[in-house]
Image: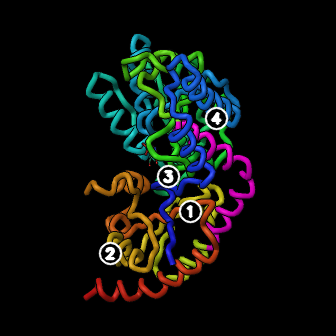
Amino acid sequence: MEVYLDNSATTRVFPEVAELMTKIMCEDYGNPSSLHMKGVQAENYLRYAKETLAKILKVNEKEILFTSCGTEADNLALIGCAMANQRQGKHLITTQIEHPAVLQTMNYLESQGFCITYLPVDAFGRIRLEDLEAALRPDTILVSIMHTNNEVGSLQPIAEAGALIKRFNPAILFHVDAVQGFGKAVIHPKKMNIDLLAASGHKIHGPKGVGFLYVNSKVKINPILFGGGQQMGMRSGTENVAGIAGMARAAELLYQHFEEERRNLYHCKRKFIEGVRQIERVQVNGLLPQDPYGEQSAPHVVSVSFPGVRSEVLLHTLEESGIYVSAGSACSAHKPQPSATLKAIGAGQEILDSTIRFSFSVYTTEEEIDYTLQVLYDKIPMLRRFTRR
Ligand code: PLP
């Protein structure tokens, strides 16, 4: 049996998405900048994608910019806004548990003379609004807070943070990295005071190598790519028409059956947490005490530590049984540093060394959960005996 439980790393493309993309690549392959019929056809796909994504977010279609991935969307939001607004101030705020797409970009901005505040999180991976309030300054120009953490699935108080920021100073821009949240949560930027929002195709059963950035029309932002002037000069480069249309189709499909799919994900999550807790000395990370099954965190992520078993060893043991998971977060897998998120929630060395992320999708079944639990019941005691020797 093959069980793919690494959906926070990437997801399987919906067949309808692959079908649409094949048609675009093989038949409707024009360049949207071309003036002839093939170009117009390609442009129509871009319009469809903008309309679809804008409808889901309840924003204007002119406020959607296509990028090559979530990382580029985050880079464009942070660098583009920092550069365009630096006369108003050079202070930015983010959290300690952001994805490297934000953290590394903030490091870069720091090297360019900007001052960054990194908000800590509590033991459940959530910022405290008091910390955000205390960090806001007269020279703050932007706050960037992720919607859903990719390692432990914690959800941030985005609407409350948005309201707080705008109460302090309506000119401060609010960027949200929603790469893990888009498709799993209802997000309406205008209601939540979000000015910029990044998302990615491959986390929502769309293709890799495509993402988008919502940018409120009032935001002052500079481009970070220069060239042919596509997308109103904000993001030069020929649009990835097939990828963009595929991403929009995937989002459309996900939000069509949204409530049902979310219920299923939470059901799988609860079943898995109940089952995994049967194993001695396991720790499920990032759950609030009043929320033992993680219904107040992301529906698709469960981070579990198995003290006494090294995460890489368990990852490969599970792989031998056809189960694919990740150790901490896939995006940091090739880096030897311990997970910033786990450290920020106060995890000690034993937890850092033994944490596995299981992440579900609409394709995850109860049978797969049962099988995974059975393999864990069989292997964990054996691996622990082996480690002790
Ligand atoms: N932000 C978060 C929270 C993520 O989880 C990821 C990818 O894992 C990214 C940004 C980067 O997205 P992409 O892989 O599309 O560059």
Question: 164 left or right of 103?
Answer: right
Local crowd size for mark 4, using a 10 Å CA cut-off: few (<14), some (14–19), many (≥20): many
Q: Residue at x 37, y 52 (%)?
A: 331
What amino acid is at disc 1?
Answer: Phe
State whether residue 155 appears in this view.
no
Q: Distance between the residues labelled 1 and 2?
A: 21 Å
Looking at the rendered structure, which numbered label has been put on residue 9?
A: none
Nearest to viewer (mark 3 / mark 2) = 2
Prevailing secondary structure of the magenta residues: helix
Q: Earlier in the sequence, mark 3 or mark 2?
A: 3
Measuring from the top left, give residue 125's x and y in whole percent.
50, 52
Query: Which stretch is magenta?
Result: 242-271
Q: Disc 4 vs disc 1: Cβ atoms closer than 8 Å?
A: no
Q: Distance between the residues labelled 2 and 4?
A: 41 Å
Q: Residue at x 69, y 63 (%)?
A: 264
What amino acid is at disc 2?
Answer: Val
- Asked if the magenta segment contains residue 196, the reply would be no
Q: Disc 2 vs disc 4: Cβ atoms closer than 8 Å?
A: no
Choose between 91 and 65: the one closer to the eye: 65
Q: Disc 1 vs disc 2: Cβ atoms closer than 8 Å?
A: no
Question: 58 left or right of 208?
Answer: right
Nearest to viewer (mark 1 / mark 3) = 1
Q: Mark 1 = which residue?
A: 360
Query: For numbered disc 1, what is the local secondary structure?
Result: loop
Q: Which of marks 4 and 3 is nearer the N terminus?
A: 4
Q: Which of marks 4 and 1 is nearer the N terminus?
A: 4
Q: Which residue is drawn at 44% across and 36% down?
A: 68
